[in-house]
Image (cartoon, helix red, strand yellow):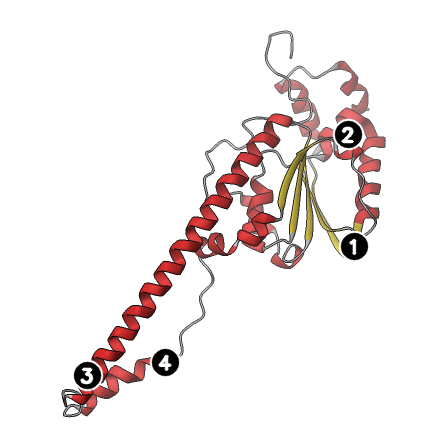
Amino acid sequence: RGANGRQCFRYGNYHRYYGYRVGESLEDHRIAHLKREWFHGKRCVDIGCNEGLVSLSIAVQFGSTTMLGIDIDTWLVKKAKEKLKRMRRAAAKQAARLVREEEDAAAEAAASREKEKDAVAGGTLRSHPATRVEATAGDDTPKEEKKPDVKTQLADSGPSLGGVTFRAGNFLDEVFLPGSVDAFLCLSVTKWIQLNWGDSGLKKMFRTIHDALSPGGVFIVEPQPWKSYKQAFRKQKMPEETRSHMK
């Protein structure tokens, strides 16, 4: 904590990073700039995952096989794990609801067909050919393929959410097998690594990512501009040793 008693988030581990409450909507504007093929069926790692919003968004929307979220802040990781539990429960609940809706729709369609058969047998539709054609032609009409909505995505995300894990730790201490990761995310993290561990820390992170990436793997990085480094010191009282890394 600083001299004024306020907590110092020296690693960028802000506890109110997302200034709005996130339920099952999974809103983060950065997701719109990511591509499904980078993550679908892939082994992914989110560096500095905070409360896990982006990690969970990718699992639900893009269907990652595994997603490991790492953050140095144990409190944030605890919140991410809680969010993951809620998402898994919501996904299971939504999947069960969609199954019931499909069963109800199938039962209704079957009843409608039986009713039509009875009408034909009774001569109701037989005496009105135009009505009969109208009633039966709809089955062969091609339907426009629709993109899955949020509810369908959530209902189908059970396996992907099952592959999500969060753990507290310093990414610079992590060890990965060569080629064991298909996609690394590093969003608004590079500044904090450089301020706390200098250029050597940043280079170590890049080496770790390079060695762990599989052939054709992707590294998505969102670097912070240099002016934001100074802002970090204006917003809070940073430890003196971090100033030496601003040269």
Q: Which mark is residue 240?
A: none
In the depicted structure, whether residue 140 falls above or below residue 173: below
Labels 4 and 1 touching (C-beta < 8 A): no
Is label 3 or label 2 in front?
3
Provide the residue designation for mark 3. Answer: 118
Dot 3: element: helix
- Looking at the image, which residue is at 58% across and 38% down? 52
Q: Relative to residue 16, is residue 242 drawn left or right?
A: right
Disc 1 crowd, CA 10 A, few/some/many (<14, 14-19, 20+) = some
Residue plotted at (70% across, 27% down): 229
Query: Looking at the image, is mark 2 or mark 4 nearer the viewer?
Result: 4
Question: Which of the two labelled residues, at mark 1 and mark 3, occupies the earlier sequence position?
Answer: 3
- Label 4 residue SS: loop
* Residue at point 45%, 39% (across, down): 23
Height in image: 37 above or below 205? below
Residue 141 badge: 4
The quarter holding residue 104 reads: bottom left
Identify the image quadrant of residue 63: bottom right
Question: Looking at numbered disc 1 in the image, what kind of residue is underneath it?
Answer: Ser
As helix, strand or loop, the secondary structure at mark 1 comes to strand
Distance in Å between CA atoms under marks 1 and 2: 25 Å
Whether tag 3 and tag 2 are in contact, CB under 8 A, the answer is no
Dot placed on the residue nearer the N-terminal end, 2 or 4: 4
Mark 1 vs mark 3, foreground winner is 3
Marks 2 and 4 sit apart, C-alpha to C-alpha, by 60 Å
